[in-house]
Image (spheres, grey):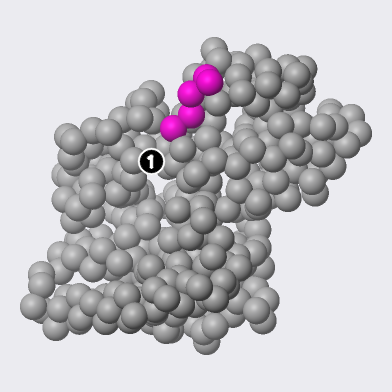
Amino acid sequence: MQFITRAWYEKKIWIWLLYPFSLLYSYLAKVRKKQYLTGKKPVWHAPVPVIIVGNISVGGSGKTPLAITLVERLQAAGYRPGIVSRGYGAATTNFPRAVSVHDNPIDVGDEPLLLAQRAGCPVVIDPDRVSAAKFLLEQFECDLLISDDGMQHYALGRDIEIAVVDSARGFGNKLCLPAGPLREPIERLNQVDFIVYNGGISDTVSVSDTQSFSMHLRACQFVALKDGQTIGFDQWQGAQKVHAVAGIGNPQRFFNTLRELGFDPVEHAFPDHHKFSLADFYDISHHSNSTDIPIFMTEKDAVKCDPDWLDNAWFLRVSAQLDEDFFVHLKSRLSTKN
């Protein structure tokens, strides 16, 4: 998969051999969407506003930190939001399922567990978003739903769509699967309510006249995997060498962040949603004869690691920072939905 992903974003010529399949994929995606829009397939509309936080490309784009920030700001505005998620990678087959902060990430998936721990609101997983939404509203007193991903899950009616774009990677060769990274044609962005560019808006990625806003992931602090101790960046002296571990959609973003903070990372990229084991870290620290070098990882990866595995491992906590105008427009749009 990583080989194909590199070909998409490095715009390799040979990938065009898959172009006929992309045309078929794009056609079927349009047909499927039209079936929901014309009523040939049923769409369930919740009795409360539904916000979709998604994207049109595969891989990570920053949806999870945005969802967390949305919950925080909406709670401050008086809403009682809940989150529904597919639960990608979850081993459980007992759907729908409410996620507890003490759940095993193997059972519920890494992103839903992180959402439950950070967002402080109900989180329900189910590959069927409609089932998840109905269960959440039955079990919890929520007056607003946020769907983490699910832009292509048209069975769930939506009031507001927010598309998240990774500015660093853009849209690759701008082709649909399997010849490119897009789940839907790029014109789909003309139909959403807001586009949030993770990393800032630039001419190289801005492709729509839809209301667009910049988002930046601000590094907050390091947190010890073992005991939750926090430490500021200024407490690390000099450009210290560290092992950087990332099993996310775009590991390079994490590695670059560490460099911006003054560190010298030894990069260890893993596939997105990688299920970590102690052996992964044994290979990193012992085979390189550097057991005294700290290990830094993302928070999404940290939820999959046992605190007893490592004594000198830390995860970087980040928060999504957006233009205040975004929240003004979002609240204004929500006020028309109530």
Query: Percent x, y for residue 316?
Result: 65, 37
Query: Percent x, y for residue 61?
Result: 52, 58
Q: Left of 56 or right of it: where is 44?
A: left
Q: Is residue 244 above or below residue 147?
A: above
Q: Residue 27: tell me if it is visible.
A: yes
**Of the pair 224 and 143, the residue shown nearer to us:** 224
**Of the pair 69 and 95, the residue shown nearer to us:** 95
Q: Residue 120: tell me if it is visible.
A: no
For mark 1, what is the residue? 112
Label count reads 1
| Residue at screen point 49% across, 77% down | 174
**Of the pair 239 and 299, the residue shown nearer to us:** 239
> Residue 214, located in which quarter of the rendered image?
bottom right
Query: Percent x, y for residue 213?
Result: 59, 71
Of the residues shown, which amino acid type is indicated by label 1? Pro
Query: Percent x, y for residue 76?
Result: 49, 50
Q: Label 1 crowding class (10 Å Cα cut-off): few <14, some 14-19, many 20+?
A: many
Residue 112 lies in magenta, yes or no?
no
Which quadrant of the rendered structure holds the C terminus? bottom left
**Residue closest to the far bottom:** 209
| Residue at screen point 19% across, 61% down | 47
**Residue closest to the far right:** 238
Magenta residues, start to end = 275-279
| Residue at screen point 76% across, 31% down | 242
Secondary structure predominantly adopted by residues drawn in magenta: loop
Q: Secondary structure at mark 1?
A: helix
Q: Left of 110 or right of it: where is 307?
A: right
**Of the pair 3 and 47, the residue shown nearer to us:** 3
| Residue at screen point 34% across, 80% down | 20
Q: Is residue 4 above or below residue 330?
A: above
Q: Is residue 5 above or below residue 154?
A: above
